[in-house]
Image (cartoon, helix red, strand yellow):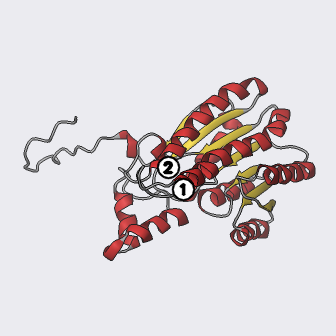
Amino acid sequence: MVVTGGASGIGAAVAERLASHGAEVALLDRDEVALRRVVDRISTRGERAAAFCVDVTDAEALERAVDEFTGRTGRLDVLVTSAGIQRYGDVLETSRALWDEVLAVNVTGTFLAARACLPALRRSRRGAVVVVSSVQGAASQTGVVAYAASKGALGAFARAMALDEARHGVRVNSVSPGSVETPMLRASAERFGGAAGADELLDRWGRAHPLGRLATPDEVASVVAFLASEDAAFVTGEDVRVDGGLLAGIPVLLPEPGRSGGEPEAPR
């Protein structure tokens, strides 16, 4: 199994979850120090993992890593694409260079990883691809035009690829998490936390979800592991939201029973 973005956050949690299920996992990431840390943690439990320091925008490096891994294992059944970056700005604030950076990692990196892995996945005849997208592919906050565009593209990419690969026995699905307690989210909170601080902002973001908290990376990883498994053998072309109910509602609150209050504003 190959996991891109495996050095931290959701990717690391996915790699650890798959390894705990007996899979031999290749972790790909450009952060070599963090990558080694995750692989060492997996290995100390007697599970199997290999580290490849690779930038997902480098097609040749991706192909070399996948060829080396499949040459050693003899097969490849699962690809999970979790590598991604977050950048901020509206259209006028987003430079061409920043736009290109986000699309290169989040979208082109996913495409290149799929191209590198597909020959082996097709040979497997029961391959699975899970694309880590975001709720922001369906509903966006302000100031993230490049990021939201990239996540919307990933949903469309996964659906199109699912149709193309079905005849080869390869299933393709995506997951769309809400706010997840990852280093990337904390970096955002530190940037925008202001006087209240990052912890307070993270708590506010968590309370915005109907379940009242942030997700953990392992909670997303459990859904990814299901989609990658034979338990999901007839599931393809789907996007599974792991968002604590975030996109299930509209921002209109009715008064609680027994409490006075004016008429609630009707949704528009």
Position of 246 with respect to 12 (left or right) is left
Q: Where, by quadrant of the figure, is residue 107 drawn? A: top right
The amino acid sitting under disc 1 is Leu
For residue 98, the mark is: 1
Q: Nearer the viewer, mark 2 or mark 1?
A: 1
First in sequence, mark 2 or 1: give its number: 1
In the picture of the structure, the residue carrying the numbered disc 2 is 146
The spot of residue 177 in percent (x, y) is: 50, 49
- In the rendered structure, the answer to whether residue 194 lies left or right of residue 114 reads left
160 horizontally vs 86: left or right: right
Mark 1 and mark 2 in contact (Cβ < 8 Å)?
yes
Q: Is residue 50 shown left or right of residue 266?
A: right
Above or below, 22 relative to 159? below
- Which residue sits at x=69%, y=42%? 111
Q: Residue at x 38, y 52 (%)?
A: 211
Q: Give the spatial CA distance, label 2 vs label 1.
A: 8 Å
